Amino acid sequence: MPALLIDDTLPALWDCTIAPRTAIAYTVRAGQYIQIIDVKGQQCSDFLAFALDDLTEELDSTVTRTLNGLAVPQVGLHGKYFSNKFRPLVEVIQDTCGKHDSFLLACTAKYYEDAGYPGHPSCSENFNLVLAEYGIAPRRGWSAINFFFNTAVSADGTVSLGESWSRAGDYVLLQAKQDLLCASSACPDDIDPANGWKPTEIRVRIFTPEHHFPKAIAYRPLPHAPAKLTQDSAFTSSIRQLTDDLAEYNGFWVPHSFAHLGVEAEYWALRERAVLIDLSALRKFDITGRDAFDLLQYAFSRDISKLAVGQSAYGCLLNYHGGIVDDGIVFCLGENTYRYVGNCERDQWWLEKLAREQGWQVHIADISDRLHNLALQGPYSRAILEQVLDLDPQWQTSLPELGYFRFATGKIKHIPVLVSRTGYTGELGYELFIAPEYGADLWQILTAVGKKFGLTPMGMLALERARIEAGLLSAGREFDDLTSPYEAGIGWTVALKKERLIAKDSLLKLKERPPKLTVGLVLESNDIPCHCQPVYAQGEAWRVGVITSGTFSPYCDRPIALAQLKPEYAVLGTRVEVGFIDGKQRRIPATVGVMSPYDPEKLKVRG
């Protein structure tokens, strides 16, 4: 079994293994931690909790869903499970699986009887047995949290189940918010895929409040890589003083929005003044060695032979059939010395794989933990940075002269920094790359200097709105490994004249006839379009595309979207319809426009 992310040698107040097909009851004091571990993987565990001072007060899934606005609580602001009296009983502190059920009953005798297995043990009956000594009346079915139970509700309301997503050693760590009587099971279901057809044991450990476990979610950079827990960036400590609305993104805690501001205020601060955005979740790789140029020239869509030291280029890493592995920026640091800033760890795996196949001598170092980045974006970003930045003399340039997709090194007070004229907002802006130990100092310096310019922090919700207005891509929405640059709207990044380029033949064909094209849509209602909603030909029954991203645009004063449409319908001014609900009961007219309704000529971002 893999090592647990919570050290298995950490002394527990109580440690118990639940045999397959059985249940246990136990008491927990307020503040203590409950770790429920799937020992061998793919094993469900139902969980009940009652207030110890009033056993009529128990966990209530409906109250929990209503107060959180989520089907299942998640680590963070919406991580509490509430009782039928609206009090929080437990909070999710860590979760390495992320797939659970909280709207079905624990399995019942009737379920097995209806399936043709009379007399089969059930979690509900096992709970009745262990709760009897506490004077709790039996029930035919217990409303429970079913950890590691893989269920889903389809668009037509059908509830389905499949094999659990949990792996050996996966766990949920809860903290008791009241003194509790709890019950946990090792589900006996062996008649369907719920437990991988073979029930196994569940382990429960209780820890004292003194351990102070950080809130975290497991993140796996590759399917078979060891799990990592969500981490703070260099700026998270400063951000936590301003908001507790943080969410997991790409292995980091990032702010959704900030208290006393909100999405609308943060958005307009970006467009009219300046904002700070923590983008440390981006991954950074230094690529060096005799064949570093050859590798990037082959794998990256842009022609990097045109880059001088101090210049960078946006493009994408491509796979064998011309699909996008990731989009990102290549920085030229020197001869055969480059830095790639992208979205995920698999970028390194892919580049190393290509280097091995071609016999190239290249060293790729993941420096993501050594280099965090803060984006300073907005019309006043340059004025703010000029107050504190001293560029190193070797660059022979000043900040106003630092062009778009150019970078230089310097210092902000005592902090060594790499300053890049790049961003993800469609506004004039800079990204500041620093060693993590300087994060709190940099945040304090910039916020102090920026106060007179109206500088504010900005969260991911406002950033999402801005990047859609600017027609900027998001991984998993506008592109994936089956989407070519021509389909994603960034065909301009492909340098087909390069002598060597991965999937060059496929890309030539895709350029000539892409199966879909990315466009902007402007909707004629107040409905906000969502990822994967269908787009139809006007007045017709057939689909012609799909929404990739949608938002309300304050700049356009109406909902807008990025969508991928069949080429015949991707012509400017074409009228289409976005399908809401089931695509038939409600159709919203929309007009095809440019990808970037905000500053389509990129005049602002070029500054």
Image: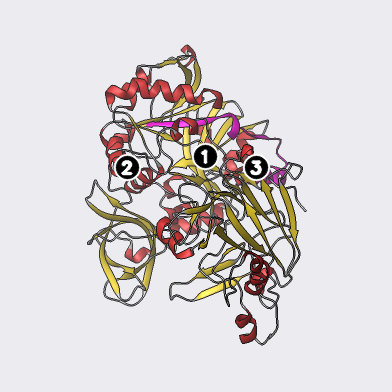
N-terminal-most mark, 3 or 1 = 3
Q: Is residue 437 left or right of residue 3?
A: left
Q: Is residue 555 magenta?
A: no
Residue 266: which numbered mark, if any?
Answer: none
Q: Quadrant of residue 300?
A: top right
Judge by depth and name the residue closer to the eye, 418 or 457: 457
The amino acid at mark 3 is: Thr
Measuring 61% from the left and 86% from the top, which residue is drawn there?
114
Which of the two marks, 3 or 1, is nearer to us in this view?
A: 3
* Rendering quarter of residue 63: bottom left
Magenta part of the chain: 349-376
Is 290 placed above or below 108 here?
A: above
Kind of residue sitting beneath label 1:
Ala
- Disc 3 and disc 2: Cα gap in Å? 37 Å
- The residue carrying mark 3 is 208
- Residue 171 coordinates in the image, percent (x, y): 65, 53
Q: Position of residue 435 (x, y in %)?
A: 55, 25
How far separated are the C-alphas under marks 3 and 1?
32 Å
Look at the image and name its color scheme: secondary structure
* Residue at numbered disc 2: 262
Instruction: From the image, state whether disc 3 or disc 2 is nearer to you.
Output: 3
Question: Which tag is nearer the camera, tag 1 or tag 2?
Answer: 2
Residue 127: x and y in percent read 64, 69
Q: Name the residue tied to disc 1.
A: 281
